[in-house]
Amino acid sequence: MKKPNIILFITHDQGQLIGCYNSYQMPNSLKTPNLNRLAENGVRFTNHFCTAPQCSPSRGSIQTSLYPHQNGLMGLVNRGWTLPKHNKTLAMYLKENGYTTHLIGLQHESKRRATLGYDTRSKTDADFNYLCNNMEEEIINFFSEHKDDDMPFYVCIGTFEVHIPFKNLGVPVDPNTVKIPPFLIDNSKSRKDLSELYGAVHTVDEMIGKIIKSLESNGLLEETLFIFTTDHGIALPRAKCTMSDPGIKTALIMSQTSSNLFNQGRVFDCMVSNIDLLPTILEHIGSEIPKNIEGRSFLLVLKGKKTTFRKKIFTEKSWHDKYDPIRAIRTEKFKYIKNYEKIETQYLLPLDISLSTRIGRFIQKRMKDTFEIPRAEEELYDLENDPNELTNLISDPAYYKTVSEMRTKLNDWMERTNDPLLKGKIPHPRGQKY
């Protein structure tokens, strides 16, 4: 029996901003009929987390099933980091299992795309900026060109959407129609930013619709596993680059209409990590799961033999545009965060948010005094009673036992995975100062 074709479609900075993900934590009024259809015909995970709230480290984890500090990709490729060659990627594992492997558009894991294991690679960023509209012809042509292949294909499609600047990526909606997430200030600045971000999401949704139509017309839809995900949370304050749920919760939709594992519109609430995607794919195609990875296959969840999966999620941050090492552990009830650098403000915004979003500039300039409170060295949040993570309980005597347990579990994980942060500051590959 032929193995399914596999599409991994990954966007930039989208979090769970999709119509069918409308929730208390991330409310939205988006019109995303094509992504909703993909979920209705497939499966959707509501508690899917990334290993890092930044582009390259999270994407490196998807490709290797290792945490950033294990595979070495602890910062952004455009700022000097790269995935070391000794790491095996999803494309490499699939090639060993009889797949042809292809990259269309954006990758953010290596300075040299040739090291990632793809048989073919599309034009570079300089050619078409990895925008959906610019890549449409190449993406659609791929399926007609490969519809009669003897070997199954794996294609990773990466888009620049929905990265800042939002206004260049789609048609903004009426600012009055957007829903403001509870972690954002509701004013004209945030509404304008979200109106443009909605427009970018609509562009992505249109591209998904065109891919589904192409798969149908080329007779590929039934036997293709279509995976939609993103790298981390939206590029607005208290999301991207933070350990808050809006920073580390991401969309995961998987659909293969010929497989009862990936259809019927089922929704799963158990916690999974993006390092779990690689082993799940490998088990689905009948491959052995490597022993030297951190991820675990959640195929038993899809088979209905498990209702829970991960009891705890680990996330990390080391370098972004600044050195800001953070490690965190999340359970269904609590989140514990350890901040390793002293920061004199609650809002350490990445440069793209502070310079290129209205609400980011507003916070930096107009609300500076309000948020210039030193960040705590440790944080604990009761997620059941405080889902927006507003009250740090680290000094509350009622939670001392929980803090001790969470602190120990986080430290044990860092030791087991040989986290270099335990030995001191992590150097930048270009020698950038801290």
Image: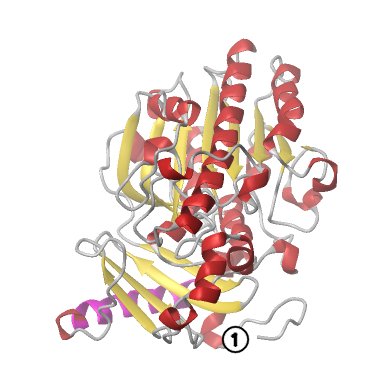
* Residue occupying the far left of the picture: 398
Please give left or right for residue 23 compared with residue 401 in the image: right
Q: Is residue 277 above or below residue 152?
A: below
Q: Tell me if residue 348 can be seen.
A: no
Quadrant position of residue 176: top left
Of helix, strand and loop, which one carries label 1? loop
- Which quadrant does the C terminus fall into? bottom right
Please give left or right for residue 238 compared with residue 308 in the image: right
Quadrant position of residue 353: bottom right
Pick whichever, 161 or 261, lies toward us.
161
User: Does the segment drawn in magenta span residue 258?
Assistant: no
Q: Is residue 398 above or below residue 222?
A: below
Q: Position of residue 206 (x, y in %)?
A: 58, 28
Q: Position of residue 109 (x, y in %)?
A: 69, 56
Q: Is residue 382 above or below residue 215?
A: below
Question: Pointer 1: what residue?
Answer: 425
Q: Residue at x 49, y 45 (%)?
A: 277
Q: Is residue 15 above or below residue 359?
A: above
